[in-house]
Image (cartoon, rainbow, N blue to C red):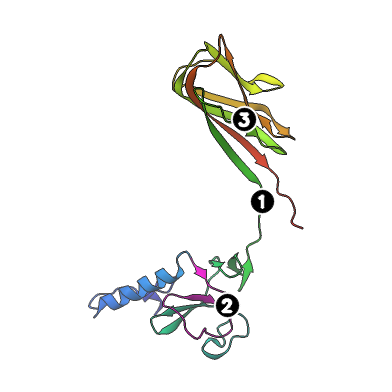
Amino acid sequence: MTQYTTPHLSMDYLVPEQAQKHVTLNEALRRLDGLVHLSVLSASRTTPPPNPSNGDRYLIAANALGDWQNKDGQIALYEDTAWRLLAPQTGWRCWNEAAGQLLVYNRDKWQTLEPSALAGLRFTKTDALFDFSKTLPVLNIPAHSLFFGVTGRIVQSLTGATNWHLGVADGATRFGTNLTVAADTLINGPANPPAVYWQATPLLVTPVGGAFTGGQVRLCVFSLSLPVPAA
């Protein structure tokens, strides 16, 4: 009776005076184990594989035969020595491992989950530690990217200079001017407005009042790149 099962996964409830309640509970755990974070080995098989392993899952393809006949579109879960067949419901999602596709069950069929209009956009955060007692790294604003800004933190107090600027070659103070040299100073230099950089452009750290002799600052660049069509 439906009042004794859960509405979505059809798991049996425990009821008063029920014998061997552990059996009912274990059956529910098996079903959850098979359906939560659902991923199938394949969605193209029409017959069971000859030597399945415990826990193997398949999405049964159309025109299935044998033990899977008339079970097209269902999830086949192998448990110990037998197949458990589970009928999907609207909204179920399933990862097809063989095809590398995410599927969703909608309108009585499995469909490839269409990518959103933003699929392929790549938002990147690139960071580097500038240690002024060593050779400095190069931290670039990526080429062909929309640049949003740079942030940072002074990890160790900077020595040798009284303050410093942060920018690029054609704008040495674009992201910060007369910044302090004390440890734990935070740098927050948003691009105003965000700008397109067509070539890789290194960040420029310019000391004021003398050359840097020591200290560390970590800087992070934030940018957005557009996807390029496949061949």
Q: Residues within 10 Å of mark 1 (few under 14, many from 20)?
A: few
Q: Which residue is mark 1?
A: 120
Q: Which residue is mark 3?
A: 149
Mark carried by residue 176? none
**Can you tell which mark lies on residue 73?**
2
Give the residues in magenta. Answer: 38-59
The answer to whether the residues at label 2 and label 3 have Cβ atoms under 8 Å apart is no
For residue 67, say whether it is visible: yes
Q: Position of residue 206 (x, y in %)?
A: 60, 18
Q: Residue 115: x, y in percent? A: 66, 57
Left or right: 86 in relation to 195: left
Give the spatial CA distance, label 3 vs label 1. 21 Å
Depth check: 86 or 177 in front? 177
User: In whole angstroms, how far apart are the C-alphas of marks 2 and 3?
Assistant: 48 Å
Q: Amino acid at mark 1?
A: Gly
Q: Quadrant of residue 124?
A: top right
- Give SS at disc 1: loop
Which quarter of the rendering shows the C terminus? bottom right
Task: Say whether disc 3 or disc 1 marks the residue closer to the N-terminus.
Answer: 1
Amino acid type for the residue under numbered disc 2: Gly
The kind of residue tagged 3 is Gly
- Nearer to us of marks 2 and 3 is 3
Q: Examine the rendering and report whether any part of residue 178 can be seen.
A: no
Q: Element at badge 2?
A: loop
Marks 2 and 3, the one that precedes in the sequence: 2
Local crowd at mark 3 within 10 Å, few (<14), some, or many (≥20)?
many
